[in-house]
Amino acid sequence: MKKRILKNIEWGILVCTILLITIGLVALFSATQNSDYDEFKKQLMWLGISIPVVIIVIAIDYEWMAKLSPILYGVSLVLLIGVLFTEPINGATSWYSIRTIYSSTI
């Protein structure tokens, strides 16, 4: 399975992605020198979280995802329609208020 995953990777896209990440980290590092590198540390944390997620997504068989696509499409439509009936947050009715839902059930 490992050979198949490595065989199907678009290496040009991977190299460009790594270059963009590196350039962004260097720019953020130089821009956050006065603030104890807080934003840089956050970016590194999210990078560390996202790499395993990307590896998992790459390992998922696309045929399995294609079989689930009608269900995922239906769930997406229900969520999009449901957003029309939410309460405005800062003037926009495009967000679900998870905190309100959670606190009202306790």
Image (tube, rainbow, N blue to C red):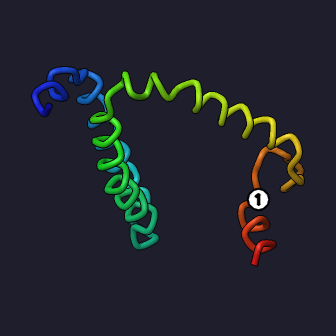
Tell me, yes or no, if residue 37 can be seen here: yes
- Residue lying at 38% horizontally and 65% vertically, measured from the top left: 41
For residue 38, above or below residue 57? below
Number of callouts: 1
- Residue lying at 45% horizontally and 22% vertically, measured from the top left: 66
> Based on the displayed image, in which of its 4 quarters is residue 18 positioned?
top left
Residue 83 percent across, percent down from the top left? 80, 43
**Along the line of sight, the residue nearer the viewer: 1 or 97:** 1
Amino acid on which the number 1 mark rests in the picture: Ser
- Residue lying at 77% horizontally and 72% vertically, measured from the top left: 105
For residue 62, above or below residue 93? above
> Based on the displayed image, in which of its 4 quarters is residue 65 positioned?
top left
Tell me the residue that label 1 is attached to: 97
Quarter of the figure that contains the N terminus: top left
> Based on the displayed image, in which of its 4 quarters is residue 21 positioned?
top left
Residue 25 percent across, percent down from the top left? 34, 50
- Residue lying at 37% horizontally and 49% vertically, measured from the top left: 50
Residue 17 percent across, percent down from the top left? 32, 33
Quarter of the figure that contains the C terminus: bottom right
**Residue lying at the far bottom of the rendered structure:** 106
**Residue lying at the far left of the rendered structure:** 3
**Along the line of sight, the residue nearer the viewer: 74 or 101:** 74
Element carrying mark 1: loop
Label 1: few (<14), some (14–19) or many (≥20) C-alpha neighbours in 10 Å: few
- Left or right: where 56 falls relative to 102: left
Residue 70 percent across, percent down from the top left? 58, 24
- Left or right: where 57 falls relative to 102: left
Tell me, yes or no, if residue 30 can be seen here: no
**Along the line of sight, the residue nearer the viewer: 63 or 31:** 63
For residue 69, above or below residue 41? above
